Image (cartoon, grey):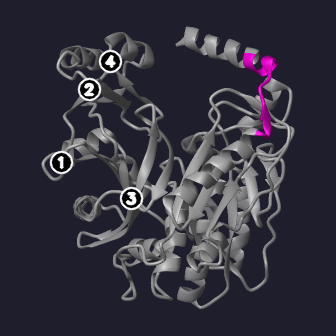
Amino acid sequence: MSDIYYSNFQLKENTEYFIYIGELKNYGLNLFLREALSKIFKRRVDFVAVVPDVFEQYNYDNLLVINPLAKQYASKYGANVSCRISARDFMACVSQNRKVKALIAQLLRRQEHVYLYMYESLPEMTLDAIDGVSILGPDSRIAHRLNSKAYQLEHLKGRVPTVDFHICRGRRRLLETAARVLPDWKDGVFVSREYGAAGVNSMIAHTLSEISERFPQADETYFVSRYLPHDHDPTVLAVAAGKDEVYIAGIADQKIEGGNRFTGSFYPSVLDESTREALRAHTRTLGSWLAGEGYRGIFGCDYLVDPQGRIFFLEINARKQGTTLEFCCTLEQSLPPGSPMLPELEFYAVTRGKFPETTVELRGNPKKLHWGTYNYKIASPVRTVSYVPHSPREREAFERVGKGLLKKHFLILEHTGSDFIVAEGAFLGRIVALGRDPFSVRQGLEQGRKTIELTIVKDKELEEIHGKDHQGKKSAG
């Protein structure tokens, strides 16, 4: 019970509940799923959200905040600390938490079944072993297998255009391979561990010493590919329900800093229609392969487009993307009323193996909606001295811009709050900017960044603690 940081959930009478488990940034997806399940089951449905986000205050209903690292960091820095816990550790902690298990037992006394809804299906989530509980999403064992970069490239070469790559079992093979290809791959090599996202566990390297220092683990599986200079990093969000049932939600352009660090996305993609159509076709091929492997649910595909216009597949994320909520809000404004949104499509994919007859794919941008996102991630600890109020109204902002009631708008979401230390690797906040044109979006993101920066100060004492800790880890490694 000591892992419970905050709790405010209250169960209503004559209401069935599902449990969301994941970061607070996806809280809004549950509103869409709540509406879909209420319509499908013809009864009142609501949810309890179990999240790891440590904030000063919360403007959300039915929360249970669990983060065992919060006390460790507070002891380290001597103050309240917002820190990030890995998805795997979080799922393992939630699976063992007595209050979560008590909540499930309470719900099962009121209803026949409890769905668990997650950002990503991971094997560390074991609560679905309880009778009457199941995951409303991809099978975790299948998703884990398919999220391996090695497994993807070994099985997809020849199905879609891929970069030149090598799979290295062990560090010695990694260094041998890198030494062999570096002289020919003049623009550098992309090196990654088998699992990773948003630039974590990967790097762009030009020398063997860089690789040797960055990857000391001997028994890991590594992925090495030729780095191709390029200007476009498109990502496609989709849903797989069967080999011939793949839904394309949309295409966005990722903002990649330093060659491998994801910081946000922009919609719609600036790529021409013929390139976008090719991306859709490749994603249908990949979705069909996923379905053949047993995967059902939302997924994303990342690509690059080189200066000659050639498309290269990079990876599948067999989970929801960070912009899944923004795509939901876009589809809601752009598709005919009553069209199923992504959580409803995922429900049908998982439980029925097909999409409802009312399914409609979006073509073009009828509402002239433009949006961008930016994740304000902290590289070294900072102290917050003021706050930005939590805004849970992202969906309403899309509606107002989509209907022309506003020309542009930006929101700062999930800001940590005041008088907190934000630990390295954590997010201080997230910005979503909307407009009728790309300039308005860029303007909103910049204003959001400046606003967030006004809430933090550098602290020499924090930097010293972080520096000593970082040096200790480096020495141990």
Label number found at residue 206: 4
Whether the residues at callouts 2 and 1 have beta carbons within 8 Å, the answer is no
Is residue 455 in the magenta section?
A: yes
Q: Which residue is mark 2?
A: 168
Q: Secondary structure at mark 1?
A: loop
Q: Which residue is mark 1?
A: 161
- Residue 228 quadrant: top left
Is residue 277 in the magenta section?
A: no
Whether the residues at callouts 1 and 3 have beta carbons within 8 Å, the answer is no
- Residue 71 quadrant: top right
- The residue under the point 65% across, 39% down is 84
Task: Quote the CA–CA distance across marks 4 and 2.
Answer: 18 Å
Q: Amino acid at mark 4?
A: His
Whether the residues at callouts 4 and 2 have beta carbons within 8 Å, the answer is no
Farthest residue to the bottom: give it.
Answer: 42
Whether residue 219 is situated above or below residue 80 in the rendered picture: above
Q: Amino acid at mark 1?
A: Pro
Label number found at residue 269: 3
Q: Secondary structure at mark 2?
A: strand
Q: Earlier in the sequence, mark 4 or mark 3?
A: 4
Q: Earlier in the sequence, mark 2 or mark 1?
A: 1
